[in-house]
Image: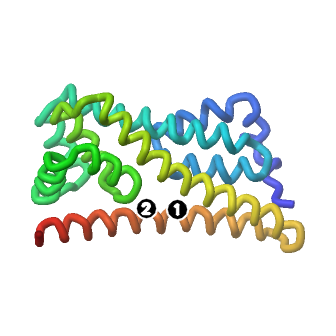
């Protein structure tokens, strides 16, 4: 069996695991959600609670970015552009697309591409209606969180089953799960660049 119980922090999960995971999901949703789902498959968490926390934590993080843009306006947007290394042409393309259909861009960016931070700050800067922002960020988050939870749970289940027969297989599968997460994130960034390039041609 894939045994993580020797690690001290796992002994404390029943006491502070859910609050800790919720905080981590706000700060770094994808990795925290996938790891929590991985641990849920091993019996450390309830998978349904993890899904709810994943969606909620992600939404709280999105609202934080929205309010950064809302309170800081164009000045904070320019700083975020430099910090996130977003080019002027990229930001302009996102803004043009945002003006065309703000609801669609929030949902699409949330569920498919890697431009969430700058797009949500932009949404606040442009004073997008809060209820609309929450709705489409939530819907996009359902898609994204579902993918992460399913992947994490699958890898955890595989680790538990295979480790009964192959020593250290669980560790190898856990590493594979992290690698899969990294690949997904890079793929999202690649897709976002491709979308922007297609927009520039049209």
Q: Residue 114, relative to residue 28: is it above or below?
A: below
Determine which of the numbered discs, if any, sits on residue 170 in the image: none
The quarter holding residue 165 reads bottom right
**Which residue is pictured at 30% across the width and 46% down the height?**
106
Q: Do the residues under discs 2 and 1 have CB atoms within 8 angstroms?
A: yes
Local packing at callout 2 (Cα closer than 10 Å; few below 14, some 14-19, many 20+) is some
Which colour assignment does the render follow?
Answer: rainbow
**Which residue is pictured at 51% across the width and 35% down the height?**
56
Q: Residue 72, relative to residue 187: is it above or below?
A: above
The image shows residue 105 at horizontal and vertical percentages of: 27, 50
* Nearest to the observer: residue 168 or residue 126: 126
Q: Which residue is mark 2?
A: 185
Horizontal side of 1 relative to 36 (left or right) equals right
* Nearest to the observer: residue 103 or residue 178: 103
Alpha-carbon span between mark 2 and mark 1: 6 Å
The image shows residue 7 at horizontal and vertical percentages of: 76, 47
State which quarter of the image contains the C terminus: bottom left
The image shows residue 172 at horizontal and vertical percentages of: 70, 69
State which quarter of the image contains the N terminus: bottom right
Name the secondary structure under disc 1: helix
Horizontal side of 63 relative to 13 (left or right) equals left
Local packing at callout 1 (Cα closer than 10 Å; few below 14, some 14-19, many 20+) is some
Q: How many marks?
A: 2
Q: Which residue is mark 1?
A: 181
Name the secondary structure under disc 2: helix
Horizontal side of 194 relative to 6 (left or right) equals left
**Which residue is pictured at 29% across the width and 34% down the height?**
66
The image shows residue 97 at horizontal and vertical percentages of: 17, 53
**Which residue is pictured at 63% across the width and 65% down the height?**
175
Q: Residue 173, relative to residue 108: is it above or below?
A: below
């Amino acid at each position: 069996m894939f045994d993580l119980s020797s690690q001290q922090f796992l002994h404390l999960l029943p006491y502070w695991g859910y609050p800790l995971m919720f905080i981590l999901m706000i700060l770094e949703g994808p990795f925290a959600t996938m790891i929590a789902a991985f641990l849920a498959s091993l019996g450390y968490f309830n998978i349904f609670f993890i899904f709810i926390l994943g969606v909620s934590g992600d939404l709280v993080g999105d609202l934080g970015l929205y309010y950064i843009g809302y309170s800081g306006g164009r000045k904070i947007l320019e700083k975020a552009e430099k910090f996130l290394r977003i080019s002027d042409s990229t930001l302009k393309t996102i803004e043009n697309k945002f003006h065309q259909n703000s609801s669609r861009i929030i949902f699409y960016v949330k569920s498919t591409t890697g431009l969430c931070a700058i797009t949500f700050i932009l949404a606040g800067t442009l004073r997008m209606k809060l209820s609309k922002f929450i709705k489409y960020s939530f819907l996009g988050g359902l898609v994204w969180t579902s993918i992460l939870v399913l992947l994490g749970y699958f890898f955890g289940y595989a680790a538990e089953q295979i480790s009964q027969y192959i020593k250290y297989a669980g560790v190898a599968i856990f590493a594979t799960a992290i690698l899969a997460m990294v690949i997904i994130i890079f793929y999202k960034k690649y897709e976002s660049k491709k979308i922007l390039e297609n927009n520039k041609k049209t």
